[in-house]
Image (cartoon, grey):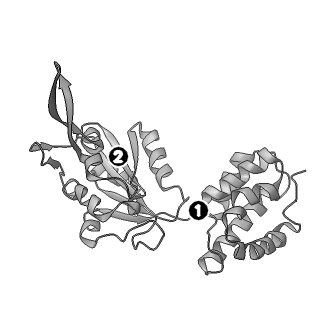
Amino acid sequence: MCILAGLVYNKRVLIVGRHGTGKSTHIEQVCNRLNWGCIRINMDSYLTRLELIGKESITFQQGKPVIKFKYGLLPWALKRPIVLVLDDYDACKPETKFVFNKLLEANGEITIPENGRIIKPNASFRILATSNTLSGSQIGTFRENSAHLDRWNIVVNAPKLSFNQELNLVNQITGKALHGNIPTKIVELARLLRRLQSKGKLSLTFSIRSLLSWAELTIILNSIGEAFKYAYLNKCKKSDRSLIHEKYTEVFGSSCSIRCT
């Protein structure tokens, strides 16, 4: 509903949630069903104002060097009837985000100081963003500036999927390849490990992305245990692996070498 409100009423929407919860995919799926073009930009810490707004560059016309302004990603997107998704917004440096301040305001626009042009967005242009955190608590992220955050009309936490929703996702991937209650156990273990991480007993959460990778690799490798190791276990600290193995055995009643058949 928040995404739809942003699209219909031209509101700025920021979706916050743990990695792998489907924040960006959710926006893409909504846009796909509305037949609304969608472009994603990865907002990493190396992204600069020059890349977003543009810069002067030297070109040759009739053999003579001429200085021209080359527009960046933001002016290009503004002129089009698309949804611009600023992905991993918290990974972008705060000083770079100030480029968006005027654009995030009502009837926003951007000014190009280098040539004095004011670029107004297309009537069907929309801007949304996704973020893992607002506090900068995760490695590689920055704390959100309160004045800048205030410009986002809607800030929503990505909802957690229910057990049945996760199970449906696993079943969509595996089909009838896994017999009995194996898909249920896969989801059960994922949610168990997620709870342990939230209590500080594990360093790495079991994201929805890891869950889907585990389900897919189970079919590819024909081994639940091997797929689990590659999708999640090998990403964890060595100090966490004994507890993870213990919980795996509790759920599946076997070692990590258990096979599908």
Q: Residue at x 74, y 67 (%)?
A: 189
Residues packed near mark 2 inside 10 Å, few (<14), some (14 to 19) or many (20 plus):
many
Q: Residue 229: where, in percent of width, then height? A: 75, 60
- Amino acid type at circle 2 is Leu
The residue to which callout 1 is attached is 161
Q: Is residue 222 visible?
A: yes
First of labels 1, 2 by sequence position: 2
What kind of element bears circle 1?
Answer: loop
Circle number at residue 84: 2
Q: Quadrant of residue 43?
A: bottom left
Q: Quadrant of residue 211?
A: bottom right
Q: Residue at x 37, y 55 (%)?
A: 46
Q: Residue 258: where, in percent of width, then height? A: 88, 59
Along the viewing direction, whichever of 87 and 47 lies nearer the viewer: 47
Q: Residue 207: where, in percent of width, then height? A: 61, 62
Residues packed near mark 1 inside 10 Å, few (<14), some (14 to 19) or many (20 plus):
few
Q: Is residue 127 left or right of residue 44?
A: left
What kind of element bears circle 2?
Answer: strand
- Amino acid type at circle 1 is Leu
**Distance between the Cα atoms at labels 1 and 2?**
25 Å
Q: Is residue 225 above or below residue 192?
A: above
Eye-nearest disc, 1 or 2: 2
Q: Quadrant of residue 166?
A: bottom right
Circle number at residue 143: none
Q: Is residue 166 left or right of residue 86?
A: right
